[in-house]
Image (cartoon, grey):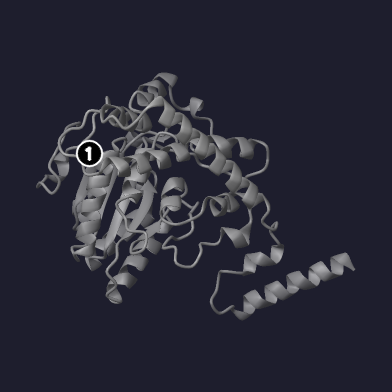
Amino acid sequence: MAGTVELGAPQEASDLVRLRLLDVDGTPLGAQPMSDPRVLDALRLMKLSRALDSFATKLQRMGQMGLYGPLHGQEASVVGSAFALDPKRDWMVPAYREQPAWLHHGLSLDRLFAQYMGRIVEARIPEGVNLLPRNQAVAAQLPHAVGLAWGLKLRKIRAAVLVYLGDGAASEGDFHESANFAGVLRVPLVMFVQNNAYAISTPLEKQTAAPSIASRARGYGFPGKLVDGNDLFAVYAATSEAVARALAGQGPTLVEAMTYRMGFHNTTDNPKAYRDDAEVAEAARRDPIVRVERYLTQAGVWSDARATEMERSIQEDLENAFAAASRFAPPDPSQIFEHVYAEVPDRVRRQKEELESFRRDSTA
C-alpha cells in the first residue's frame, strides 16, 4: 500500500504503510532528511554504481572478471541505507550486490575490482574498514551479522551493524534463526531487506503468505519498517531511525525496501525467461536515479552540464581503478590458506605442505 507515514508512528504488523518522502516526479513529500550537497554525493554514488554495472558486465563477458551481480534499479536502497551509517563507528555486512555501499564504507574501487578478478591478497578488506567480505551463499551472512552485533554489545562498544539481504534470503532458515537470536538478545542490528520482487526467478508471491517481510519482525520481538526502496530519502530516514534505535540499546529493526531489479540476477541469468518486458518498463518509470535528478533539477542544483561532468569523472574513476587492479599480482594457489585462521590448524598446515610438495615435484 503506497502512502506516507511519520517515522516512529505505531503500526499494526498487518497494516504497515510504505514510507515515501520523494515522489516519482521528484517532488518532495514533506521535510527532507538530507541536505542538497549530501544528495549530490549520494547521486554520484548511485550513478557510479549504474556505470560500474555496465563496465563490469562487459569485462565479465570478455573473460576478464568473474561472476557479477548488478544493482541496476536498486541504487536508492543501497546508497540511502549506507549513508545512514557512520563508517568509522558502524559495521556493514554485505550480501553480494551492494557495491556502492562497500565503496562508501571505505573499500577502494580497485580493491572492489580485485574481488571479481581473483586477486585474493588485494581483495582482502583493509584494516580499519568496518566491512565483512561479500557473501555469495544466500543468507549465510545473517548469523555472522548477529554474532558481530552481539560481540559489540558484550564489549559495550557503541556501534550498529547493518546486514543486507534479499527477499529470497528471507525464506532461508538462517533468516529465521538470526532474527530470533537478534530479538532475544536485543543486539544493535539493522536487517535491511532489498525486496527486488524476485529470488532469482521466483516471484515474491511464491515466497511468503505474509503481507510483507517487514510484518514478520513483530514475531521476533522488534519493529519492522516498510519503505519505498526507490526513494533515496525514505530509505535514508528509515535506516537512520533504525541505527538510532540500535545505538540507544533498543535492539534490532528490520527495514524492508520495496524496489525492483531492472537488470539480471547475475551474469549467468536470463530474466526474459521468467518476466515480461512490460513489467521492466513499468519499473523503469520509477527509476531511483532519475527521481533524484528530478528533485535536484527542481532545487536548481542539477543541469545537463553537471551531469556530463559527473559521468566523465565516473568513467575516469572506473578505468583508473580497473587499470590499477590489473597490475595486482595474479593469484597463487597457496593463498587459499591465508587470511582464514589466526592460528593455522595442523590439518590445514599439512594440506599447504602437500600442495607445496606437489608443486615442487611437478616443476622438477
Left or right position of 118 against 136: right
Along the line of sight, the residue nearer the viewer: 210 or 106: 106
Which part of the image, by quadrant, shows the C terminus? bottom right
Judge from the rendering whether residue 360 lies leftward or rightward of residue 319; answer left or right. right
Q: Where is residue 53 in the image (x, y as percent from the top left)?
A: 51, 37
Which residue type does callout 1 highlight? Pro
Please tell me whether residue 122 is drawn above or below residue 239 in the rendered image. Answer: below
Q: In which quarter of the image is residue 63?
A: top right
Vertical comparison of 356 with 321: above or below: below
361 with respect to 341 (left or right): right
The part of the image, by quadrant, that contains residue 177 is: bottom left
Reading the image, the residue beneath label 1 is: 211
> Quick check: 212 above or below 122?
above
The structure residue drawn at horizontal position 24% and vertical position 52%, both measured from the top left corner, is 240
Looking at this view, is 269 or 100 the one in front? 100
Which quarter of the picture shows residue 205?
A: top left
In the rendered image, residue 108, in percent from the top left (x then y), is placed at 51, 54
Q: What residue do we see at 59% from left, 53% from top?
A: 114
Q: Would you say residue 264 is visible in this rendering?
A: no
